[in-house]
Image: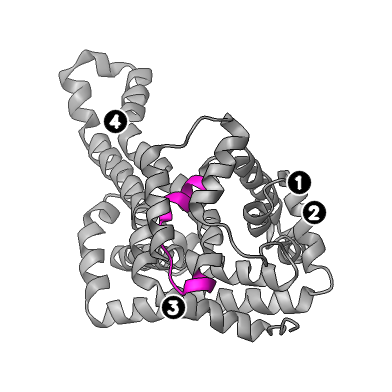
Amino acid sequence: MAKKNKTPLGIFTEAIGLYFSNFDKFMKYMTFPVLGQIAGLGLVFLITFFYTQKIPVLVQKYSIFNDFNMLILLSIVITLPGLAIFVKAFWEYLVAYGAINSMLDNMLKSGRVYDFSAHTELIKRRTLQFVGLWFLFGIFSLFAICPLFWIICAIFAVYFVLVFQVFTYEPELSPFGCVKRSLGLVKGHFASTFMLMALAGALTYIFIPQLIIKLCSLCGINSFLSNLILPLVNALPEINLQMYGIPMISKSEIALFTIETFLAQIIIQYTLPLRSILWSLWYKELGGKGEKKAKRPSERLMEASNKKYGKKKLDKNILKRAMEKDEED
């Protein structure tokens, strides 16, 4: 029986269904990658704030702090814990995009996800190639910042939207090969792919974040959190915006805007699995690999281990956990 083609709207609704049917598992999986970034940055800013407040006292009491280089060195040292948490969480967030791609076959087969560790390990075992792909993405983003390249970068963004799905499902390709393959898959389907991007962007970057922010505002959460950071905002130097033709903004408004911006960012990052599922479904619809019976996580890990280490085995706990989940399915 011939495969029935799915419309972009059908792909979109299917991705939403798969995401929310496993919502609790995705929330748990994404908690450290998302909140770890916020916690790391928060720790850096908090320590830096109190440090700068104490600098006059330190200089007065201890002669060693009269050296500017010492002040800079100490500021770097005391912020290292926060930076370490942020970097760890950010890396886990990047890996999660590829790992969730890997989970799609199991979701389509059983309607549920399991063994996040095994799927995450599949991506981490190709760290060098994965970093290379993100490096290419970073270069592309630098060009996209310049207004002169906005239009052409927007066009290429549509063609390159499947690069991470290609990376997951076609491990034999190099980072440049993933880019080329994505372009080939989207070619001839530009309008449909753009439509999916618009739907996904509107839902996960605008509608869901604004809805939750509005609910938090009605519950008084936004005001409560903004009052907590108001002392930090009050410590910021005054800037006369009126000389630039910009109306003056109160410190309380700045604090509220900061909280709402952070809330929006958290919500957007928590919906990463939805976007990953969506583009994995679209990848398969456009003729990508993975239409055959999916290999179990334990089988894929063992195959990758044999290629790289010969007869050496994977970590027993990871493999055992993957095989137990395979048996449950």
Label 1: which residue?
176
Residue 7 seen from this side: yes
Q: Secondary structure at mark 4?
A: helix
| N-terminal-most mark, 3 or 2 | 2
- Label 4 and label 1: CA atoms lie apart by 39 Å
> Quarter of the image containing the N terminus?
bottom right
- Label 3 and label 2: CA atoms lie apart by 33 Å
Label 4: which residue?
78
Residue 221 % position (x, y): 23, 73
Tag 1: amino acid: Phe
Residue 245 seen from this side: no
Label 2: which residue?
180
Q: Secondary structure at mark 1?
A: helix
Q: Secondary structure at mark 3?
A: helix
- Label 3 and label 4: CA atoms lie apart by 37 Å
Q: Using the image as rendered, state which of residue 117 and residue 318 is in the foreground.
A: 318
Secondary structure, magenta segment, majority class: helix
Q: Residues within 10 Å of mark 4 (few under 14, many from 20)?
A: some
Tag 3: amino acid: Ile
- Tell me which residue sits at (83%, 68%) in the image: 187
Point out the stretch of residues depicted in magenta.
107-122
| N-terminal-most mark, 4 or 1 | 4
Q: Using the image as rendered, state which of residue 220 and residue 20 is in the foreground.
A: 20
| N-terminal-most mark, 4 or 2 | 4
Would you say the residues marked 2 and 1 are in contact, meaning their CB atoms lie under 8 Å apart?
yes
| N-terminal-most mark, 3 or 1 | 1
Is 287 within the magenta? no
Q: Residues within 10 Å of mark 2 (few under 14, many from 20)?
A: some
Q: Using the image as rendered, state which of residue 213 and residue 254 is in the foreground.
A: 213
Is 115 within the magenta? yes
In terms of image quadrants, where is residue 12?
Answer: bottom right
209 versus 70 height, above or below: below
